[in-house]
Image: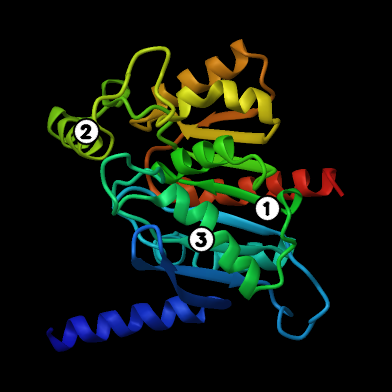
Amino acid sequence: MSKILIVAFLIGLVSFKAAGQVDTLEVYSAAMDKKLKVAVTLPDGYDSNRDILYPTVYVLHGGSGQFSDWHQKITAPGLLSQLANQYGFILVTPGVGPSSYYYDSPKMDSVKYETYITKELIPEIDRKYRTIARREARAITGLSMGGHGAITLSAKHPDLFIAAGSMSGVMNIDTRKWKVGEDFAALRRKQQYAMLGEINYEAPFSEYTAVGLVERIKENGISLLIDCGTDDFLIETNRQMHQMLLENGIPHEYTERPGAHTWEYWTKALPFHMLFIHQVFEGVK
């Protein structure tokens, strides 16, 4: 590694660690027999106020991302720490496989991220930190692939989450609804087949995709926030999900505003998600 790259790498580490009180952990997954990194952002005063328990929000990264994305790629440095302080949240940003969509593959033992998040990571965070370990004080949101993860995990596990959000989320993994080039669409479809095998891309949709979980969402009463930029390549999947929720009489917040599939958009979106989640938490006290 060149001296320039070493310096750049060290600068990145310093900027990541300096952004408030952030712990970096390695959490072992028995389901996949591997360790995965996760960053935990704590509000100021966490160490000094030993009697206080805190709500927790899981913030998921997108495809080909990693656990540190929300700290290193966001266009407002230190935003997670600011939001943790503003609302008194513990913010958890886990890392998962690059195109895993946060589900359990029926074909690959190395892709069991639903099990990891719900049965391994959450219990470990609740054990290690002073969380309010109840659904009424736990929420989940994410961008792109992470939006898909947040909506699907909350739909399948309403005992764990009171609210869920999606920013530019993959609400339907059917690449025919994505505004992307054929090469990219074909690559994603190939990856999906390797992990899932043959699934139904037409209604009734597979439960491996967010639009296939509308009936579960209708039953579980989770508070939902979905937003997407009008220039995003996933806008049609978000409009499809919005329409299906409306047709089923499912209360939810839905927003379209100018923007594309960019960190500038997600940086602006995250504070709205934290405010929404805060209001849900306040409403169940």
**Residue 212 at what x, y percent from top left?**
46, 23
3 vs 2, front mark: 3
**Residue 84 at what x, y percent from top left?**
66, 65
How crowded pointer 1 is (Cα within 10 Å; few <14, some 14-19, many 20+) is rated as many
Q: Which mark is residue 103?
A: none
What amino acid is at disc 3? Glu
How crowded pointer 3 is (Cα within 10 Å; few <14, some 14-19, many 20+) is rated as some
Task: Identify the residue at horizontal 26%, vertical 46% (top origin).
Answer: 108
Q: Name the image quarter holding residue 104.
A: top left
1 vs 3, front mark: 3
Vertical arrangement, residue 225 with respect to residue 132, above or below: above
Q: Name the image quarter holding residue 234.
A: top left
Q: Is residue 82 left or right of residue 141?
A: right
Task: Identify the residue at horizontal 52%, vertical 42% (top origin).
Answer: 153
Front residue (pair 77, 283): 283
Vertical arrangement, residue 256 with respect to residue 30, above or below: above
Task: Identify the residue at horizontal 29%, vertical 46% (top origin).
Answer: 99
Vertical arrangement, residue 276 with respect to residue 23, above or below: above
The residue sitting at the right extreme is: 285
Q: CA distance from mark 1 to mark 3?
A: 15 Å
Label 2: which secondary element: helix
Question: What residue would you read off at disc 2?
Answer: 193
The earlier-in-sequence mark between 3 and 2 is 3
Q: Is residue 259 left or right of residue 91?
A: left
Question: What residue would you read off at disc 3?
Answer: 120
Question: What residue would you read off at disc 1?
Answer: 138
Q: CA distance from mark 2 to mark 1?
A: 32 Å
